[in-house]
Image (cartoon, grey):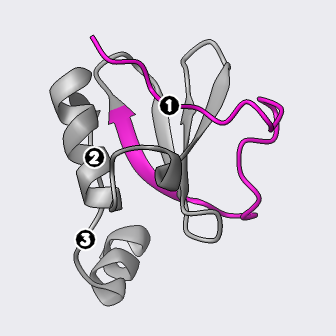
Amino acid sequence: MHRYVTCTACPAHEPLTQSRPLFLGVDGEGAAHYWDSYEFAVAVVAAGGDAERVVLAETPFETLEEWCEYTRGERGWDAGPHVGGSLVGDLIRGVGA
């Protein structure tokens, strides 16, 4: 099993700098994944509250889609991932229309 490549320079309680990161989904181990486009990083928040930041530039993955496929292979997805599509589609889903 592969371990996530994490950034140890940031405290776990501050995994991302973007004030409202995009919720990606919940993996098969119950960890929530959030995307910060400003940092080009994913925050992985375990069910127990521990968090880690994964900067894609420090991994073999070049895109968020590659990260999501990696997570699918390693942990699976219970909910999500919610990536791709259009902004309009995201907004419609967000308001429940």
Find residue 36 and report its horizontal and vertical position in percent.
58, 61
Foreground: disc 3 or disc 2:
2
Q: What residue type is labelled 3?
A: Gly
Is 37 left or right of 73, judged from the image as shown? right
The residue at 36%/16% (across/down) is 29
Q: What residue type is labelled 1?
A: Val
The answer to which image quadrant residue 90 occupies is bottom left
Foreground: disc 1 or disc 3:
1
How busy is the neighbourhood of tag 3: few (under 14 within 10 Å), some, or many (20 plus)?
few
Q: Is residue 66 above or below residue 83?
A: above
Whole-angstrom CA distance, mark 2 to mark 1, is: 14 Å
Is 42 left or right of 71, judged from the image as shown? right
Q: In this view, does 66 lie above or below 40?
A: above
How busy is the neighbourhood of tag 2: few (under 14 within 10 Å), some, or many (20 plus)?
many
Residue under pointer 3 = 84
User: Disc 1 on helix, strand or loop?
Assistant: loop
Dot label at residue 68: 2
* Numbered range of the magenta stretch: 1-26
The answer to which image quadrant residue 96 occupies is bottom left
